[in-house]
């Protein structure tokens, strides 16, 4: 397959090109070579996309939920049929290993389309009796929604936003990250192949300025952003100026707490999944691994041993299980944090350097004896860098785990289920795990508290964030008035 898309944008049911926009090269992270090029959206392209979405939305909302749902479920089927092709493309777009993308990206997107397609017909209001009178409620779409994506899960992010938005009767203009421009176009293509009316889902390319123009447009009713906390703060503020609805799926520095009664193999597995999957480029990663003192050295020894199982190489080779950073820029950022960790005196257990091969590979890195004040324990790194901190008591670890502006995820490993629930109950996070890490099924709400986010994706919760309730009071008798 060639990763070069037919054109840069997808608007009103078709691919659209405008070479007046600045070229954005698509670089394969495993080699550093350019494999495609798209162009950033000009103001004319942004206008075309917004106008198409606005024009298409009303008729889409008038279709029955059953009809809308059928189209989304058909799109899910097509995504599953084309999983291999979509996974290869995801690997070109991100550099993530095909071994991962085959099971985590188009499949997760298809799950969202199937789940919200299934819910579409049951989005109803309620009847509230009030003696002779009554109130009924209607669940209505918000209207024109903007989706803005990060670069780590381009197919999944497009689908997690499009599926609930469209199920509720909204239209969407989606802007993928400028680092991963390819996958969202395929999502648009497949939705239209499944019968989506033209204009209901549109894709435009561009940097933050294009995102900013979409957020500022007065026709837009809702903005759903997946990105970093600093971008989230800007977008939230811009949206609030016009009372737009928002969903903010932002970054984290999540705690993973391992008590000394935990099954060590499972805990090590959880820490590996929560730090090295997608080469550490996962928002919910448990990058502060708190290990109770009694098992610290045993845990570290086993972790170092199992980390040797990382197979680096061409991510399109299914035997490879550890890919490069998405871009040279991300590699430089992560290497900078590794140097800070060394300079701050953390103990390097393994990794700690760029891998000597083409592309942007960094060896899976573990630091031990990390303290709460170190930069590597406070800031989101978004790469394969695990910080292991030790603790003595439950009260102490809860307080230290919560001492952060972030609140996306948290995990606990222990055989004591009473303690597991008590500790999870006390941790300030939106998406939590007991004796597991980083599972994200569509049935479960996903999102953060504190600076990590506003609102939830997936599950029935997402419906609340893409619809609003109208209540209608119905008087059966005469109107009583004071005069
Ligand atoms: N919580 C989640 O579900 C989740 C999932 C994936 C990634 N993330 C987070 O995303 C971050 C990594 O992604 P990134 O580097 O692409 O993030 P980023 O914040 O740099 O960019 C995210 C998106 O916002 C756009 N953007 C930038 N400035 C903008 C502005 N002023 N107005 C409108 N749009 C603007 C970018 O072009 C991009 O499409 C990490 O912090 C990670 O934790 C969160
Ligand atoms: C949502 N999730 C955890 C699958 C990917 C976040 O980066």
Image: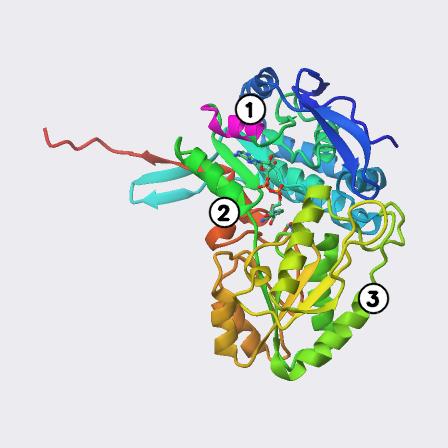
- Which of the numbered marks, if any, corresponds to residue 455? 2
- Residue at horizontal 57 percent and vertical 22 percent from the top: 53
**Position of residue 385 measured from the top left corner of the image (x, y, whole percent):** 68, 60
Task: Confirm or deny contact between disc 2 and disc 3 (CB under 8 A).
Answer: no
Q: 260 or 157: which is nearer to us?
A: 260
**Position of residue 44 measured from the top left corner of the image (x, y, whole percent):** 59, 15
Residue range corresponding to the magenta coloring: 209-218
Mark 2 or mark 3: whose residue is earlier in sequence:
3
Q: Quadrant of the N terminus?
A: top right
Q: What colouring does the structure picture have?
A: rainbow
- Residue at horizontal 61 percent and vertical 81 percent from the top: 293
Query: Is disc 2 placed on a helix, strand or loop?
Result: loop
Check the image and report above or below for 233 versus 272. above
Mark 2 or mark 1: whose residue is earlier in sequence:
1
Query: Is disc 3 placed on a helix, strand or loop?
Result: loop
Query: Is disc 1 placed on a helix, strand or loop?
Result: helix
- Which of the numbered marks, if any, corresponds to residue 308? 3
Residue at mark 1:
57
């Amino acid at each position: 397959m060639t990763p070069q898309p037919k054109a840069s944008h997808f608007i009103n049911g078709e691919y659209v090109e405008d070479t007046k926009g600045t070229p954005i090269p698509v670089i394969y992270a495993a080699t550093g070579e350019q494999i495609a090029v798209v162009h950033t959206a000009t103001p004319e392209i942004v206008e075309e996309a917004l106008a198409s979405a606005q024009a298409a939305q009303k008729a889409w909302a008038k279709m029955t939920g059953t009809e809308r749902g059928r189209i989304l479920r058909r799109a899910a089927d097509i995504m599953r049929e084309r999983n291999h092709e979509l996974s290869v493309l995801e690997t070109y777009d991100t550099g993530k290993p095909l071994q991962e993308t085959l099971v985590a990206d188009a499949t997760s997107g298809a799950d969202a389309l199937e789940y919200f397609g299934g819910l579409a017909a049951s989005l109803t209001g309620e009847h509230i009796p009030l003696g002779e009178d009554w109130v009924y409620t209607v669940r209505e779409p918000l209207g024109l929604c903007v989706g803005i994506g990060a670069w780590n899960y381009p197919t999944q992010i497009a689908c997690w936003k499009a599926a609930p938005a469209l199920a509720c009767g909204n239209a969407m203009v989606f802007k993928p990250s400028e680092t991963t421009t390819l996958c969202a176009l395929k999502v648009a293509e497949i939705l239209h192949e499944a019968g989506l009316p033209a204009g209901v889902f549109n894709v435009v390319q561009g940097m933050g300025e294009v995102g900013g123009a979409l957020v500022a447009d007065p026709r837009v009713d809702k903005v759903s952003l997946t990105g970093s906390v600093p971008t989230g703060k800007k977008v939230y503020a811009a949206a609030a100026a016009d009372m737009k609805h928002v969903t903010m799926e932002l970054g984290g520095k999540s705690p993973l707490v391992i008590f000394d009664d935990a099954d060590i193999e499972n805990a090590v597995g959880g820490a590996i999944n929560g730090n090295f999957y997608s080469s550490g480029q996962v928002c919910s990663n448990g990058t502060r691994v708190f290990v109770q003192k009694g098992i610290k050295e045993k845990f570290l020894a086993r972790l170092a041993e199992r980390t040797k199982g990382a197979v680096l190489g061409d991510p399109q080779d299914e035997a490879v299980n550890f890919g490069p950073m998405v871009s040279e820029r991300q590699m430089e950022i992560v290497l900078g944090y590794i140097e800070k960790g060394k300079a701050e005196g953390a103990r390097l257990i393994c990794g700690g350097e760029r891998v000597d091969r083409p592309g942007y590979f960094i060896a899976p890195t573990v630091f031990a004896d990390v303290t709460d004040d170190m930069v590597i324990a406070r800031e989101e790194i978004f790469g394969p860098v695990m910080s292991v901190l030790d603790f003595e008591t439950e009260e102490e670890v809860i307080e230290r785990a919560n001492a952060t502006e972030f609140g996306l995820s948290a995990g606990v490993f222990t055989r004591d289920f009473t303690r597991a629930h008590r500790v999870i109950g006390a941790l300030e996070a939106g998406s939590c795990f007991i004796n597991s890490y980083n599972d994200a099924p569509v049935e479960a709400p996903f999102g953060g508290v504190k600076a990590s986010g506003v609102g939830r994706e997936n599950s029935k919760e997402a419906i609340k964030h893409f619809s609003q309730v109208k209540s209608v009071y119905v008087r059966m008798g005469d109107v009583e008035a004071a005069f």
